[in-house]
Amino acid sequence: MKRRDWLQKSLLSSSSILVSPYLLQALNSKDEFDEILRLHWNENPFGPSKKVIQAVQAAVPDANLYWDEKNEELRSKLAKNHYLKPDQYLMTSGSTEILSLLGQHVGLQKGEIIMGDQSFPTIGIFGSRCGAKITKVAMKGNHLDLDAMLAAINDETKLVFICNPNNPTSTEISKEKLEEFCKEVSQNVLICVDEAYIEFSELGAEGSLVSLVNELPNIVIARTFSKAYGLAGFRLGYAISQSHNINALQRRYPALGMAPGLLPFVAGIAAVKDQGFVTEVVRKTNEGKSIMYDAFDKWEVNYASSSTNFLYVEKDKFVIDVRPKLADDNIWITQWPSMKNHLRISIGRPEWMETLVTKLEPLRV
C-alpha cells in the first residue's frame, strides 16, 4: 500500500485526528460526555460539513506543500460568485485579521475611526494601540445610528466601521439604507463593512454590499468562513475591495501572503461548493431562535429580533448571577463588559436551546 493511501485510510478510520473535539462531542451521546453547551462564541454547532471534512482528510498528505494554487482557486471561485476579479480579494486567517490590519492602518496615520458604541471591538482595539482616535457613536435602540455616524465624520476621520449584521446586538441595517449611507460618505474616508453574519441575515448573502465594490473606491468588505460555514478552527476569512485597497492591506499584512495554510484553503474551497450545508445551518439556527423567542415572549423578556446566530437579551428578568449559575450547569453564555444590561446567547442545536430554556426558567425573577 502506498504511503498516501495508507495515511488517507488511517485518517478516515480515525476522524478524531481532524474533527474538532466540539464536533466529536456533538456526535456522541450524553451518556459518554458531560456535554458543555458552548453558547458564548457564536460558533456553528453543526459543522464543518462532511464534504469539507473529506476534502481536508484527502489533503493532509500534501501538508508539506505551500498553498499557492489553492489560494488562487479559492479567490477565483469567490470572485466568480461575486462577479469580481481575484485581485480584489485578500485571504487572511479569519476576518479578525482584516479588522486589525485596517485598525493599524488608520492608527499609523493618527486618524480617527468612527464606530457604534455597541459593536465588534477589534478594529477599535488595534486602531487605538497604533494611535488612532476612536469615536463611538451611541446606538439607536439596538441598531447602529447611521445618521449620527454620518454627522460625526470630520477632517480627521479615516475610517467608518459598520458591522452588519451587528455584533453583539444581532440587528441589521437594510441593504438599501446601508448603500445610501455608503454613497454619502466622502470617498476620502474608508468604509469597512463587517459581514461575518451575512448568511443569517434577512436576505442572506444577497444582502451583502459586495455589489458596491466596483462602484465605490473606499469600501472594504470583511467576510469569514467561521460562522455559517463552521470553519472557526481553521481561521479563514477574506477582504473584498478594489485592487488598490487590497494591495495596500497586503503590504501591511505581517504574514506577507503566507497565511492561511493549505488545509484552510482546501476547507474553504469545499465549503463554497457545499451551499446546501449553509442553507441547512441557517434553517436549523432559525429553529433554535424560535425556541428562544417563544420562551422569552412567554416570560416577557425583551430581546432584539436577530439577523445572526445569536440573541441580544435584556437580563433584568433573570437573577444577577445568571451567567455563573448557567456555567454551573455547563452552559456558557456571554456578557461583554460594555453590555451593562444585556446578555448575548449563541444559538446552538435546537435540543440545546430546549435545555437552555429548562435551565433558565428557575433563574427568572
Image (cartoon, grey):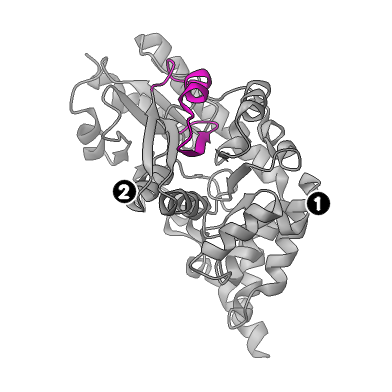
**Is 275 drawn above or below residue 299 in the view shown?**
below
Q: Residue at x 41, y 17 (%)?
A: 303
**Is 9 drawn above or below residue 289 in the view shown?**
below
Picture coordinates of residue 93 (x, y %)? 52, 60
For numbered disc 2, what is the local secondary structure? Answer: loop
Magenta span of residues: 138-167
Q: Amino acid at mark 1?
A: Lys
Camera-side residue: 339 or 225? 339
Is-magenta flag for residue 33? no
Q: CA distance from mark 1 to mark 2?
A: 45 Å
Picture coordinates of residue 286 (x, y %)? 56, 28
Which residue in the rendered view is the most extreme toward the front? 155
Q: Is residue 132 visible?
A: yes
Q: Residue at x 43, y 44 (%)?
A: 111
Is-magenta flag for residue 139? yes
Q: Amino acid at mark 2?
A: Asp
Q: Quadrant of the C terminus?
A: top left
**Is 249 drawn above or below residue 144 in the view shown?**
below
Nearest to N terminus: mark 1 or mark 2 = 2
Tell me, for residue 80, which label it has, or none.
Answer: 1
Camera-side residue: 283 or 189? 189
Picture coordinates of residue 145 (x, y %)? 48, 20
Residues at badges 1 and 2 in contact (C-beta under 8 Å)?
Answer: no
Name the residue tied to disc 2.
Answer: 34
Q: Quadrant of the N terminus?
A: bottom right
Eye-nearest disc, 1 or 2: 1
Tell me, for residue 52, which label it has, or none.
Answer: none
Give residue 267's quadrant in the image.
bottom right
